[in-house]
Image (tube, rainbow, N blue to C red):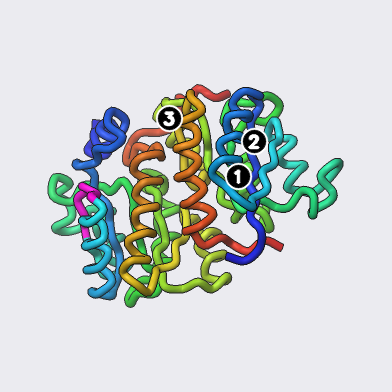
Amino acid sequence: MAGKTSILIVEDDAGDAYFLEKAFERVLANCAVHRVCDGEEAKAYLQGVEKFADRRAYPLPSVILLDLKMPRMNGFEFLAWLRGEPELKIIPTVVYSSSENPADIRKAYEMGANSFLHKRLSMNATQETMRSFARYWLEDCGRPPLE
Amino acid sequence: MNGTQKQNKALEGNPGMYRQCTILIVDDDENDIFFVKRAFTEINVHCAFQMLKNGQEVVDYLSGHGAYADRQKYPLPIMILMDLKMPIMDGFEVLVWLRARPGLKVIPTVVFSSSDLAADITRAYELGANSFMTKSVTYDGLLLKLQTLSQYWLEHCKHPNVGEADSSNSAVA
């Protein structure tokens, strides 16, 4: 796989984000993990504006891990924006939500989520899910070239 | 509750149990189909597999044309594993057709192709592939890839209900 990999976490809950960052620290070597707090900030990150202007510090992610329920711009609104951006819409985006509502799951896929992972409550379970996520998306899947 | 909803219920209750689920494998190469099937058996994936040889057969299957009208025998799949280069109708054409079908467009569809060309990968994602895996040339490589794939999709992912259900009662504002 060419290039260094990176993951963008879009999550407003500091506790959930902490679990994710810890999990990735344990299961991933040589992968940059960045976190933003809501859809608006994710948008700014991907557009490379404001504090995200430096692409070396804030590279376009190999894959996005997206919470659904967030203030300002939620996960669905973010997906709608992302899939309308010609240069960015091919970035694989995986919803990571505690919702088990079939309507949420279906809507996420309808709006172009690449898959839907159920948010885990413990550190160990989070790590297990993220190990599978990282192996799948960063090692075994072909990734679209960005820029 | 339709067939796929029942399958999803089974998945929710027992993450390791997906005995009642159907996966479509679409490939024109009989050797590839043989090894994919063998690998899935070896890694203990207890899904029902339906083998189709080209895109037109996928359209017929998902639309319930002809013999495929029998959903007991040919249930809607929880996912599709599809080659790109096939006669009659290729994988790209299937993606275009599928993503325009309201009841079916949510079916997770993974492209499984021998191509590793950036242009093919980009186009597949643009047309709505859920992900893209390049086939391995060795059987051991194939086994590892399908192991990662089945663990990710069958143990960790939530699958959408396929068919008539809609998403209008989502709880997220």
Q: Earlier in the sequence, mark 3 or mark 1?
A: 1
**Disc 2, SS:** strand
Q: Are marks 3 and 2 on the same chain?
A: yes
Q: Residue at x 42, y 25 (%)?
A: A101
Amino acid type, residue under disc 2 in the picture = Val
Q: Earlier in the sequence, mark 2 or mark 1?
A: 2
Q: Which mark is residue A64?
A: 1
Quadrant position of the C terminus of chain A in the picture: bottom right
| B46 part of magenta stretch | yes
Q: Which mark is residue A76?
A: none
Q: Which mark is residue A10?
A: 2
In this rendered view, identify the residue nearer to me: B162 or A91. Answer: A91
Q: Are marks 2 and 1 on the same chain?
A: yes
Q: Which residue lies under the disc numbered 3?
A: A103
**Disc 1, SS:** strand
Chain of the residue under label 3: A
What's drawn in magenta, residue-wise? B44-50
Chain of the residue under label 1: A
Is B122 on the left or on the right of A146, as rendered? left
Quarter where residue A81 is shown: top right
Amino acid type, residue under disc 3 in the picture = Ala
Q: Evaluate if marks 2 and 1 touch, with contact meaning CB atoms under 8 Å apart.
A: yes
| B104 part of magenta stretch | no
Quarter where residue A65 is shown: top right
**Disc 3, SS:** helix
Q: Earlier in the sequence, mark 3 or mark 2?
A: 2
